């Protein structure tokens, strides 16, 4: 019998065929236009006129199923800090395409892996703000709007060793503990005021995964109607409302921390909830004071603060087969797996990766054909699938 605890998985990958220049930090290199162009050439699956790229994760989190969609602005916006990193920065047309692509990929995963007792299925966006240094450990390899789709075997998770409870990717440099211990109640009350129909609030404890015991203390919503609801515009509108609510909460809280500023932002989506719930909450002000004092006294901690909104928003299938939506402030590690209690240690092992690559790629090609059928893009050829069929790369 397994006990709920975060797990650490070792996932092999093939070494990327590019050398990181001397004196360039890995995350600086991964965010360079040169590397992102190479990513599309070597791992690209599908592009569309709106600018979205579906690609195989070269250094992924799961070798069972693992893919991502990015809003690829890397060749026209050369400043990594100037690229869109959140859905609210998309146009209406771009948002519709991004949502439709997400729906198609997620429904494909549910069809291929229908049993919640056997597989954990989820996708999520991880956004970071412009104050996060490019050479910071854990900054994602694609500094653009992206949605990451993964499937894990529950048996593999159950048999994996427990992750260290003080793993920085789980502890969020102390900020996650702050949210859980001092902001959880007001955070949940604030989100409870949103006018939602397709997303039904559930107690945070109810959405925990049995194996990992995560997520912890976060607002959670069941998708009423399950996978079928992903085909409704109403769901995606409410999914965006959750993000906008988070942005309101984050901006108001960190304005209070930064400058003791209690003004309601002019761009706020939910000004009444900010005024009625947040600004009159003693807990809210207490937490802001504690964080402010720590920032003033501890330079290392101050360097960890993300002053602008940085978040993770997930859709995952829980142990009961329900689709659950949750959202959190971002962590240092920045991988959405950690929000579900999964720490992934990726290692270069070409032989081990070669054993699983064909099955992984063939699924992604099948998924690509479905996206093409629904007019969501055109195929991209790479050395590994030059004509829509997997070709094993020559051993290095």
Image (spheres, rainbow, N blue to C red):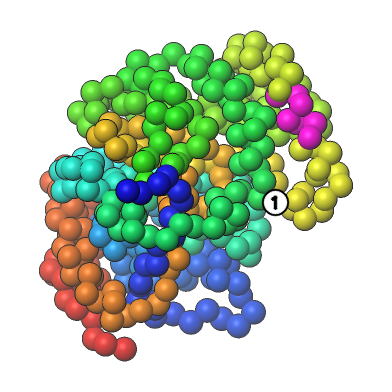
* SS assignment at label 1: helix
Main SS of the magenta part reads: helix
User: Is residue 162 located in the magenta-colored stretch of the structure?
Assistant: no
Q: Is residue 185 visible?
A: yes
Residue at point 35%, 72% (across, down): 13
* Left or right, 240 with reference to 159: right
Which residue is the extreme one toward the bottom?
A: 396
The magenta span reads 284-290
Give 355 or 367, whichever is nearer the viewer: 355
* Left or right, 226 with reference to 73: left
The residue at which mark 1 appears reads as 304
Residue 292, position in %: x, y?
A: 80, 37
Residue 259, position in %: x, y?
A: 81, 32
Residue at point 21%, 64% (across, down): 361
Residue 45, position in %: x, y?
A: 25, 60
Which residue is the extreme one toward the right?
A: 297
Residue at point 44%, 33% (across, down): 326
Which residue is the extreme one toward the front?
A: 1
Give 249 or 154, whichever is nearer the viewer: 154
Q: Is residue 74 visible?
A: no
Give 114 or 37, whichever is nearer the viewer: 114
Residue 79, position in %: x, y?
A: 58, 58
User: Up-down: is 124 above or below 360?
Assistant: above
Q: Residues within 10 Å of mark 1 (few under 14, many from 20)?
A: some
Residue at point 60%, 72% (across, down): 25
């Amino acid at each position: 019998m397994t006990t709920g605890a975060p797990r650490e998985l070792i996932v092999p990958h093939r070494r990327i065929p590019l050398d990181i220049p001397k004196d360039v930090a890995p995350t600086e290199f991964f965010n360079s236009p040169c590397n992102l162009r190479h990513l599309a050439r070597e791992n690209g699956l599908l592009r569309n006129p709106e600018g979205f790229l579906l690609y195989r994760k070269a250094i992924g989190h799961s070798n069972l199923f693992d893919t991502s969609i990015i809003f690829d602005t890397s060749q026209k916006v050369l400043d990594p800090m100037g690229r869109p990193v959140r859905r609210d920065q998309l146009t209406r047309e771009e948002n519709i395409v991004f949502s439709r692509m997400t729906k198609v990929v997620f429904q494909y995963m549910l069809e291929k892996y229908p049993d919640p007792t056997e597989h954990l299925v989820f996708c999520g966006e991880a956004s970071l703000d412009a104050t996060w240094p490019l050479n910071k450990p854990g900054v994602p390899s694609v500094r653009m709007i992206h949605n990451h789709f993964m499937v894990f075997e529950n048996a593999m998770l159950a048999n994996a060793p427990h992750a260290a409870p003080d793993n920085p990717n789980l502890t969020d440099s102390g900020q996650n503990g702050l949210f859980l211990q001092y902001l959880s109640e007001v955070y949940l009350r604030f989100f409870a005021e949103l006018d939602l129909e397709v997303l039904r609030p559930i107690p945070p404890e109810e959405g925990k995964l049995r194996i990992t015991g995560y997520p912890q203390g976060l607002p959670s919503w069941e998708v009423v109607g399950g996978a079928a609801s992903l085909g409704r515009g109403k769901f995606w509108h409410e999914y965006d409302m959750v993000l906008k609510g988070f942005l309101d909460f984050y901006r108001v809280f960190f304005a209070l921390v930064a400058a003791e500023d209690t003004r309601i932002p002019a761009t706020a989506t939910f000004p009444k909830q900010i005024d009625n719930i947040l600004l009159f909450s003693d807990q809210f002000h207490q937490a802001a004071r504690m964080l402010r004092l720590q920032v003033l006294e501890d330079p290392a901690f101050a360097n960890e603060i993300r002053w602008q909104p940085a978040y993770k928003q997930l859709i995952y299938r829980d142990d009961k087969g329900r689709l659950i939506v949750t959202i959190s402030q971002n962590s240092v590690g920045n991988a959405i797996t950690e929000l579900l209690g999964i720490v992934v240690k990726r290692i270069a092992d070409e032989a081990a990766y070669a054993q699983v690559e064909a099955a992984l790629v063939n699924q992604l090609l099948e998924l690509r054909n479905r996206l093409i059928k629904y007019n969501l893009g055109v195929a991209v050829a790479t050395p590994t699938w030059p004509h829509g069929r997997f070709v094993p790369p020559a051993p290095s």
